[in-house]
Image (tube, rainbow, N blue to C red):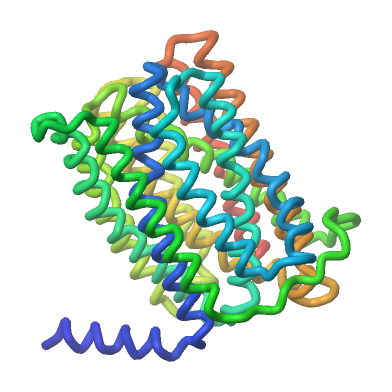
């Protein structure tokens, strides 16, 4: 009865949101399902086929280059097509790119980098439009709740999905399937969910942003601070994208082990995010939230540098993924609030701020990725990984004061 009452209260709270906010939330949840089903195993597939732990970073580097260019493309498309049509195009494109990866005849650094360049285009189309949809359709006082809800539900999805998919792929040879066929079946599932996520938001009309220019000139002080916050945070985020699957597949086990580890980590992260999302004063405690995740991240990075083994890898991955989820929990409410505050013509002319933020987030990720590749080609892989994770963790100290100033 107690759990039933909690569930009913949560349903009632969700229904209190506007219809557009609910639809967007469902779309985000479906996107998260498709993303958690495909992303980590895409990178595992790339590592296995190339035999190189750094191959996900090569793929990501290509993606970081084209994502800002995709925002420019989105700006041009939005002058002729609806916001939702562009968003759906991005989602379908993402699903299609996943499918293409598993049919590539050759997996090497050249093909991976080119694939990353193409993958960044639909990803940029989606995030450019999603950011605007979120700004336009979710009230400021509802953003901590929706951020907590989507984060915690994403973690719950991340608990079950990697576990199931990982062991299905790992055990497929014992059932008479080769692993590549299992990966291709996964791609079909992924593209179906991506399309469904697009169809949900397509039902509701939203006014297109009025895009008169893309470049931000003479930004106010608050936006400069936000640029720094974005840049520093993205340096750690680059590792959260490229390392987990690569480390587990290379040093610990197969896809089943990968799925199991990612699922267990998601349990802890999901509970933490849900509790934080329901706090009424979450926005005033963002610095403490970040500090709560940053201390274990730095300590685990030092431990990995001192002793690189299964245990240090696992401890670091737990700390890294929890910090990553806490960072985005803090980031999104700040981001959308800053867009509203610094948009001189209101929400409908804020696209250039979204573009500006995308430049800085990809700049930070690109610098970290290039540093990682430089280290790995000049030292052994264990040393390179240990050094880059510590440097990235220490860089996050700077976001604490910035988060306080932006709150």
218, above or below 147, in the image = above
For residue 175, say whether it is visible.
yes
Picture coordinates of residue 348 (x, y %)?
76, 74
Query: Is residue 124 left or right of 390 when viewed as pictured?
Result: right
Out of 89 and 126, give the one closest to the viewer.
89
Q: Residue at coordinates 56% horizontally, 41% vertically from top-left? A: 119
Image-quadrant location for residue 183: top left
Image-quadrant location for residue 277: bottom left
Out of 318 and 112, give the one closest to the viewer.
112
Picture coordinates of residue 198 (x, y %)?
50, 66
Query: Is residue 76 left or right of 376 when viewed as pictured?
Result: right
Quadrant of the rendering where the N terminus is positioned: bottom left
Q: Residue at coordinates 14% horizontally, 29% vertically from top-left? A: 173
Q: Residue at coordinates 43% horizontally, 54% vertically from top-left? A: 325
Query: Is residue 317 left or right of 373 when viewed as pictured?
Result: left
Quadrant of the rendering where the C terminus is positioned: bottom right
For residue 296, say whether it is visible.
no
Q: Residue at coordinates 35% horizontally, 31% vertically from top-left? A: 44
Picture coordinates of residue 201 (x, y %)?
52, 73
Picture coordinates of residue 285 (x, y %)?
50, 67
Most distant residue in the right direction = 218
Number of disc labels: 0
């Amino acid at each position: 009865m107690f759990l039933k009452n909690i569930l009913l209260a949560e349903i009632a709270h969700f229904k209190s949101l506007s219809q557009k906010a609910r639809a967007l939330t469902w779309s985000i949840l479906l996107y998260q399902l498709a993303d958690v089903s495909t992303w980590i195993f895409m990178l595992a597939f790339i590592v296995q086929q190339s035999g190189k732990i750094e191959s996900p970073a090569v793929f990501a580097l290509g993606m970081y280059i084209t994502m800002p260019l995709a925002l420019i493309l989105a700006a041009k498309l939005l002058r002729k097509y609806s916001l939702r049509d562009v968003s759906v195009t991005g989602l379908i494109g993402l699903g299609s790119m996943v499918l293409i990866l598993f049919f590539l005849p050759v997996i090497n650094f050249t093909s991976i980098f080119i694939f990353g360049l193409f993958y960044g285009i639909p990803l940029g189309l989606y995030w450019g439009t999603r950011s605007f949809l979120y700004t336009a359709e979710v009230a400021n006082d509802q953003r901590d709740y929706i951020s907590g809800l989507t984060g915690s539900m994403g973690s719950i999805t991340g608990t079950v999905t990697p576990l199931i998919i990982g062991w299905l792929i790992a055990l497929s040879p014992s059932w008479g399937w080769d692993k590549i066929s299992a990966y291709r079946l996964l791609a079909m599932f992924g593209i179906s969910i991506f399309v469904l996520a697009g169809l949900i938001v397509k039902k509701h009309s939203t006014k297109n942003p009025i895009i008169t220019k893309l470049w931000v000139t003479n930004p106010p002080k608050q936006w400069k601070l936000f640029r720094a916050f974005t840049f520093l945070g993205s340096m750690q985020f680059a590792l959260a994208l490229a390392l987990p699957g690569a480390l587990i597949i290379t040093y610990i086990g197969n896809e089943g082990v990968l799925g199991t580890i990612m699922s267990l980590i998601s349990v802890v992260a999901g509970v933490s995010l849900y509790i934080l999302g329901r706090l009424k004063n979450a926005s005033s405690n963002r610095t403490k939230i970040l500090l709560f995740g940053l201390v274990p991240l730095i300590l685990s990075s030092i431990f990995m540098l001192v002793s690189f083994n299964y245990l240090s890898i696992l401890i670091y991955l737990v700390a890294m993924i929890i910090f990553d989820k806490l960072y985005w929990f803090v980031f999104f409410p700040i981001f959308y609030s800053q867009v509203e505050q610094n948009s001189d013509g209101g929400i409908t002319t804020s696209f250039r701020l979204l573009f500006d933020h995308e430049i800085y987030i990809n700049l930070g990720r690109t610098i970290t990725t290039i540093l990682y590749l430089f280290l790995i080609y000049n030292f052994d892989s264990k040393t390179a990984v240990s050094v880059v994770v510590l440097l990235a963790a220490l860089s996050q100290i700077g976001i604490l004061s910035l988060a306080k100033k932006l709150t």
